[in-house]
Image: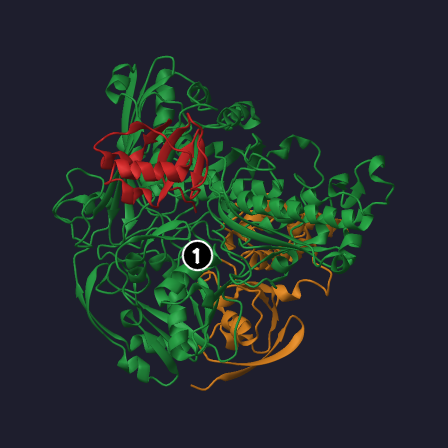
Chain colours: A green, B orange, C red
Amino acid sequence: MNDAAHGEYKWIGTRPPRPDGVDKVTGRAKFGADTALPNMLVGAVLRSPHAHAKIKSIDISKAEALPGVKAVVSRDDFQDMPSEMVPAGEMMVNYRDMVRNVMAREKVLYDGHAVAAVAATSASVARRALKLIEVDYEVLPHVIDVMAAMKPDAPLLHDDIFTEGVEPVPDKASNVAKRIEIGFGDMAAGFEAAAEVIEREFDTQPVHQGYIEPHACLADVSEDGQAELFCSTQGQYLVRAHCARLLGMDVSRLRVTASEIGGGFGGKTVVYIEPVALALSRKACRPVKLVMSRDEVFRASGPTSGAHVRIKLGAAKDGTITAAEAELFYQAGAFPGSSVQPAAMCAFAPYALEAVNVVGWDVVSNRPKISAYRAPGAPISVYAVECVLDEMAARLGLDPVDFRLKNAAKEGTKAAYGPKFGPIGMIESLEAAKAHAHYQAPLGPNQGRGVASGFWFNIGGETCVSLNLNEDGTLNLLVGTPDIGGSRASMAMMAAEELGVDMADIQTMIGDTGSLGFNFLSAGSRTTFSTGMATVEAARTVIEELRRRAAKIWEIDVDAVVWEQGSAKPAGSNAGEFEPLSIAELAKQAGATGGPIAGHAEINAQGAGPSLGTQIVDVEVDPETGGITVLRHTVIQDAGKAIHPAYVEGQYQGGAAQCIGWALNEEYVYGEDGRLQNPGFLDYRIPVASDLPMIDTVIIEVPNPSHPYGVRGVGETPIIPGIAAVANAVSGALGIRLSQIPMSPPRVLKAIEEAG
Amino acid sequence: MAKYHVTTTINGDAVEFLCEPEQTLLDVLRDELYLTGSKEGCATGDCGACSITLDGRLVCSCLVLGVEAEGRSVETIEGMADGDQLHPLQQKFLDHAALQCGVCTPGVLVAAKSLLEKNPDPSETEVRYWLAGNLCRCTGYDKIIRAVLDAAAEMRGA
Amino acid sequence: MARVVLTANFALYTGGESELELEAESIRQLLRRLGRRFPDLAPHLEQGLAVAVDGQIYQDDWFQPLAPDSEVHILPQIAGG
């Protein structure tokens, strides 16, 4: 049901202010660490100083005895979980791994791994208590680099990982958790038919999502086991599911309220300190506030994989790609489960191919368990692919955009990961890139221009909303997905459009887990799509009920009543001469006509449409310092339908900035001892205001036929093309292709030196 | 461990508080005075989310000890609006959609206000360098810079 | 008869058979029949997958109907961040 053909919208496509805006510019909005409760304790976590060690014993007695300490927890306070993949609200998780990541059991597996935690009457008492916990470690050799971890003699993290996805199943345990493979077509024939074949290898380092707000929560467990949790999260229902499971509670007895969230990008889709805070609160019978320091965020929450990627590409003289091959080696962190699967599926996705094959390896190593970072896995694989595409275009003497256009996927193309595409905006984004002033602008000395494209699936998922008509004709819309970037406004706009009322009459609120049925995360580029779809359905239910009430009042058939511009009207003069009844008038009479009027929707939103995009980047390289300045960055991407264009632009610009950081500066630096050397914003260098130019955006709209307004998710795709666009620009400026990111000044200087 | 008694002025109001010697001014603002508008992003002065002014000077409150507020004047985000009248910077941030998650916003606003008090007509480059100490991960800074320049223009014209 | 393509690692559990035909009226019916035909595959069809029907991807949508000649791809589950 696609109403995108309606044409003129009153609200969709406009830029009203967001309802939570004033609270956020005055400091009133409450983020995860911004509340307190009477009798509250402060929590603190003791973390491993070793990258890999057996825990021989933990003695908490001295800490427990310290005045002011009200609870100490360790592995003994968490029930072990059997190893099995279980659905936890649509995601597959292995709780055996999760309980160990939350609190180490037999071993510590990374520098920063949680070993014990305390709750005390003040932060200073908590800190002193941590020092009194005695942990006897047997330090083991560690391994971090993905290729090193795959070697047969590498230190073994787990003795029960036997590589899945290989035949025959190995009889020796290793760090290689899984092998995956996708593709189709005759690869040998494809390479045979190629006029040019390019094979390259690339290395990337782990990068962190870098949200400015550290993980924070406030847990309050009462003596009968009912609990409340206030936390910064992308999904309060998943937090509830995981915490209830780990603490052995009924889901119904744990109420989780999502605070405002200071950035997540996929990093706040899992739990770290929340189960610990609940365990402490349960033991102390008092509320416990637990907040990660920035140091802890870097050491103990999940950055992305670092990876090694091999690409082999064959193309005919006319630019047709004849064979596309990739091998991805991804770090999973301390427990299995990197994003190598979606990385494999996305790697060549924007292109129409006859022969494609991608093999991926999921490898554990002694660093934190990875967490999603926007489009998980894809930025890395696409970085490598798009660099090789660029090199191939140059070798064939083709313009990089034309080369991509020649091979672009479109509606009906068989995707590299299998099914045929519906309508997609790949060609539109490339043509817009070619036509953009940026693409024609002249370049100066030491300057280069790079182009790259990218794809992300986007998802739907379980969503519940409730839309209540108040007695004065205003409405409250209750949704279950946290507002990361303005979605409260987007939902109100869609509801207002449906109902024909002023957007200011609709207040969007984010419900806690007790107020609505299950909602999947604000992630996966799903919020505007799924919560929007549910909102539209709920609004249409309200309209149905309003028509019924009007019909009763007028004593005519409901089919003779229409809803237009916020009022019920007779369908025609045949229906009768009745003055329209506004929503406010009907609301006032709701009690007498049958009771309060509301609409709700509980759906599993399907039909998410992929978002494709192309980015153009200009850089200037300083050959003396190796410093790279980004001069210009343009993001062109398909939004299907931009409900609130400013928020779509914001997603494009934010993702582009993250690409720049990933490509140029950001990396985890580990010492010989396996400890993270740069767990802070000084040495983990994310882009600052003076690093970046204005970021131009072009919103393409190829409507998604499965959404009432044609919406496609947009949040993740922006982080995909930019890295290669920067890399291609650097190689254009330098005349040398680097094969490692980040392209920090020392690496650039080394490359210049080696090129002679 | 005995606490120190501190007398200070916060957003124009006379305030007294008790704090431990190692508590930072940020800790005090948030945990003792419940002024949670200033945020802790790093506690090491790298992110600017805790930006305040101390006797008119822009500082990271995580790098100032609570006891150092004695006898001085502290201005935080909570003092930026005048009753229900938003400061032009705050209004422009809303108009330009210069925030997404909003956690860096208080620090950026305090820093931008401090800039415009010193330099009412900054260039784009000057704004970018002044705000280089305020990390934002969501926006890529584009709309933030536009909002600051627009507010500056309005404040000059008004 | 729906035409079924097993992508990614799913074909490992069918002795290498990655394309086959199966009659089914809904996604759930298809998955159950697939699981009966290939018992090693069955546990991998219970969860953690996405199903594309004529190009449209469905996740956790058992009762989505299939047309008599639908093209169905069994994919790994897609998440996000």
Q: Give whichever of C40, A257 is nearer the camera.
A: C40
Few, some or many residues within 10 Å of mark 1 (<14, 14–19, 20+) = many
Q: How far across and down, in percent of the image, does residue A711 sit? A: 57, 37
In this rendering, position of residue A170 left or right of residue A692: left
Residue situated furthest right in the rendering: A577
Q: What element carries label 1?
A: helix
In this view, the residue in front, A372 or A196, is A372
- Residue A358 vs A680, above or below: the answer is above
Q: Name which residue type carries label 1.
A: Leu
Q: Compared to B7, does A524 lie above or below? A: above
Q: Can residue B145 be seen in this view?
A: no
Q: Mark 1 lies on which chain?
A: A
**Coordinates of residue A448 in the picture (x, y in percent):** 44, 29
Image position, residue B35 (x, y; %): 58, 70
Question: Which residue position holds label 1?
Answer: A238
- Rendering coords of residue A717 (x, y %): 47, 38
In the rendered image, the vertical position of residue A356 relative to residue A144, given as above or below: above
**Residue A508 image-quadrant placement:** bottom right
Residue sitting at x 56%, y 39%: A694
Residue at 65% in and 30% down:
A5
